[in-house]
């Protein structure tokens, strides 16, 4: 069977329609609770008859690094996307990592299209669309901007007419449902060989596993998974990261404002704390996650400060640039002198005055650390002799659907 090689991994060209779904923020317990309560009959059957493991996402457990790992089949050390946001040392500016100029590796999506496959990509927010669609000759659009698609830029027009739905709010469960509705319509009308669907974690940021709102959301997804299977698709489902409550006993956000701490220790403006969770849509998390990087002035050594930060209550891990790059497979030139990770119930902020938490209308739930690394990896086809002891990664999803689907 014909195949391609991308970023050192070999893939067969699809023998049947192949779909990979990234359910943003899908802590494995969401699926467990929904299946146990009878909300996901399709998933229950797949867990019994298909293939399923708990896999690891990449650290930082944020959206952009993991989506790009899934579509490149590689770690951030290879593709270069190490956060939603970074400090560009060359320009001295803090910038979003949503421009394809930051990509250092080709995507499997583009390579499959170049090999003659029909490829379609639907994502929630436009911030990710340009990265996923880099050099892709196919369909690629976001639900957020579904009313503004062109053949030249997105490979499709008339999306709202195709899907039969209006553009939903960015802060809604309907944004993700639009993605699934679009995916089913594309499969029925355009029959892509490969499709990648990537949702938003709005629901998971606000609602815990087993809640009524989460149950309704997972019930909705289950219906669309069944429709895609009815269309003959091999489907792999994974997540970019998990999600946990980040609150104190009184339900207030459990935050270590690291920039304020360092300013108090060392003096104002001597260090720079970067929060890679930052993106244009911070209402539901206030730019607070469990992972931060710290840039230090030349006269300070990382080792001299690492132990002091690690001693703060609520900090799980502090690593130097070299150690973090090695342990988490990160591009060393795009992270700070220190990488700081909070414990399960703790988020890390910059300066308190720069965080607007007025939009939080529910107890804070967020991600970014080791506590959100475990994610589901499920496929509706059985893998013979599946090695359950192997460390599977979310970026093995395309390997599953293309190379191992029975």
Image: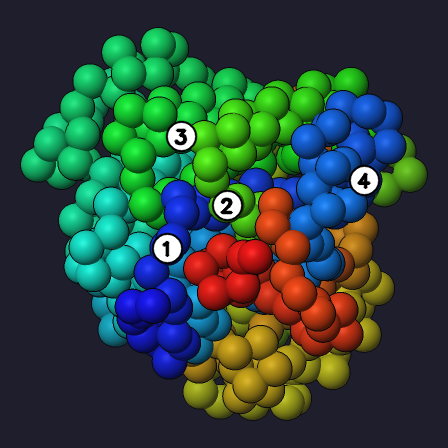
Mark 4 to mark 3: distance in Å? 24 Å
Q: Is residue 322 visible?
A: yes
| Nearer-the-camera pick, 323 or 311 | 323
Q: Earlier in the sequence, mark 4 or mark 3?
A: 4
Q: Nearer the viewer, mark 3 or mark 1?
A: 1
Figure coloring: rainbow
The residue that label 1 is drawn on is 14
Q: Are marks 3 and 1 in contact (CB under 8 Å)?
A: no
Mark 2 to mark 3: distance in Å? 13 Å
Q: Are marks 4 and 3 in contact (CB under 8 Å)?
A: no
Q: Earlier in the sequence, mark 3 or mark 1?
A: 1
- The quadrant holding residue 257 is bottom right
Q: Are marks 2 and 3 in contact (CB under 8 Å)?
A: no
Q: Secondary structure at mark 3?
A: helix
Position of residue 112 measured from the top left corner of the image (x, y, whole percent): 27, 58
| Nearer-the-camera pick, 130 or 288 | 130
Mark 4 closeness class: few <14, some 14–19, many ≥20 residues within 10 Å: some
Position of residue 26 measured from the top left corner of the image (x, y, whole percent): 66, 43
Q: Secondary structure at mark 1?
A: loop
The residue that label 3 is drawn on is 183
Q: Are marks 1 and 4 in contact (CB under 8 Å)?
A: no
The residue that label 2 is drawn on is 234
């Amino acid at each position: 069977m014909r195949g391609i090689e991308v970023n050192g991994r070999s893939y067969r060209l699809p023998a049947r329609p192949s779909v990979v779904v990234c359910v943003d923020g899908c802590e494995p317990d969401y699926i467990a609770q929904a299946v146990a309560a009878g909300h996901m009959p399709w998933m229950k059957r797949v867990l019994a008859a298909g293939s399923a493991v708990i896999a690891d996402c990449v650290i930082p457990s944020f959206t952009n690094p993991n989506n790009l790992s899934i579509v490149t089949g590689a770690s951030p050390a290879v593709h270069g996307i190490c956060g939603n946001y970074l400090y560009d040392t060359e320009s001295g500016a803090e910038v979003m990592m949503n421009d394809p100029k930051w990509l250092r590796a080709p995507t499997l999506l583009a390579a499959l299209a170049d090999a003659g496959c029909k490829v379609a990509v639907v994502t929630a927010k436009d911030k990710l669309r340009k990265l996923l669609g880099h050099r892709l000759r196919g369909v690629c659009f976001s639900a957020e901007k579904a009313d503004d698609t062109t053949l030249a830029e997105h490979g499709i027009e008339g999306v709202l007419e195709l899907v039969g739905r209006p553009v939903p709010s960015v802060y809604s469960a309907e944004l993700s449902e639009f993605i699934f509705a679009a995916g089913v319509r594309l499969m029925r009308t355009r029959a892509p060989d490969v499709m990648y669907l990537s949702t938003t974690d709005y629901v998971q940021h606000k609602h815990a596993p087993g809640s009524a709102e989460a149950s309704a959301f997972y019930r909705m997804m289950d219906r669309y998974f069944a429709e895609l299977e009815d269309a003959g698709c091999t489907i792999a489902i994974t997540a970019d990261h998990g999600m946990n409550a980040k609150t104190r006993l009184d339900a207030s956000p459990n935050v270590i404002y690291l920039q304020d701490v360092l300013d108090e220790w060392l003096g104002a403006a001597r260090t720079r704390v970067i929060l890679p969770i930052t993106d244009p849509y911070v209402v539901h998390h206030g730019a607070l996650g469990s992972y931060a990087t710290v840039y230090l002035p030349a006269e300070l050594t990382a080792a001299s400060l690492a132990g002091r930060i690690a001693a703060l209550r609520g900090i799980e891990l502090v690593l130097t640039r070299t150690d973090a790059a090695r342990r988490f497979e990160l591009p060393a030139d795009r992270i700070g002198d220190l990488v700081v990770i909070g414990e399960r119930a703790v988020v890390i902020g910059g300066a308190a005055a720069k965080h607007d938490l007025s939009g939080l209308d529910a107890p804070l739930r967020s991600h970014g650390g080791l506590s959100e690394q475990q994610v589901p990896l499920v496929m509706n086809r059985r893998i013979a002799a599946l090695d359950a002891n192997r460390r599977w990664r979310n970026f093995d999803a395309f390997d599953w659907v293309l190379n191992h689907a029975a």
